[in-house]
Image (cartoon, rainbow, N blue to C red):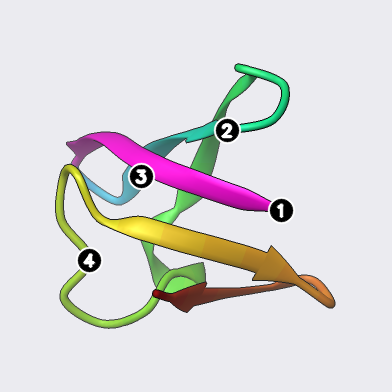
Amino acid sequence: MLCTVIDVRGDYAFVKYDNTGVVSEVAIALLPFGVDVGDKLKFENYEFIAI
């Protein structure tokens, strides 16, 4: 699933999934290093990958 980082607050990022529009709070430690607002990610096999 593809998603976009829409906000970063402290140790958490909020990602919006492109296909459903659902917004989820994700621990920043689970995301690729240096992720920032507007970055596109792919969630596959329980792992976030920068695209």
Are dots 1 and 4 in contact, CB under 8 Å? no
Q: Which of marks 2 and 1 is nearer the N terminus?
A: 1
Residue 24 magenta: no
According to the picture, the residue beneath numbered tag 1 turns out to be 1
The relative height of residue 20 versus residue 31 in the rendered view (above or below) is above
> How many angstroms separate mark 1 from mark 3 (CA)?
19 Å
Quarter of the rendering occupied by the C terminus: bottom left
Residue interval drawn in magenta: 1-9
Q: Tag 4: Cα neighbours inside 10 Å, few (<14), some, or many (≥20)?
A: some
Are dots 2 and 3 in contact, CB under 8 Å? no
Are dots 4 and 3 in contact, CB under 8 Å? no
x, y (%) of residue 46? Answer: 79, 71
> How many angstroms separate mark 2 from mark 4 (CA)?
17 Å
> How many angstroms separate mark 2 from mark 3 (CA)?
19 Å
Would you say the magenta stretch is mainly helix, strand or loop? strand
Residue 5 magenta: yes
According to the picture, the residue beneath numbered tag 2 turns out to be 18
> How many angstroms separate mark 2 from mark 1 (CA)?
8 Å
What amino acid type should be assigned to the residue bearing mark 1? Answer: Met
Give the quarter of the image for residue 32.
bottom left
Q: Earlier in the sequence, mark 1 or mark 3?
A: 1
> How many angstroms separate mark 4 from mark 3 (CA)?
11 Å
Q: Earlier in the sequence, mark 2 or mark 3?
A: 3
What amino acid type should be assigned to the residue bearing mark 2? Answer: Asp
Are dots 1 and 3 in contact, CB under 8 Å? no
Residue 24 located left or right of residue 47: left
Q: Earlier in the sequence, mark 2 or mark 4?
A: 2
According to the picture, the residue beneath numbered tag 4 turns out to be 35
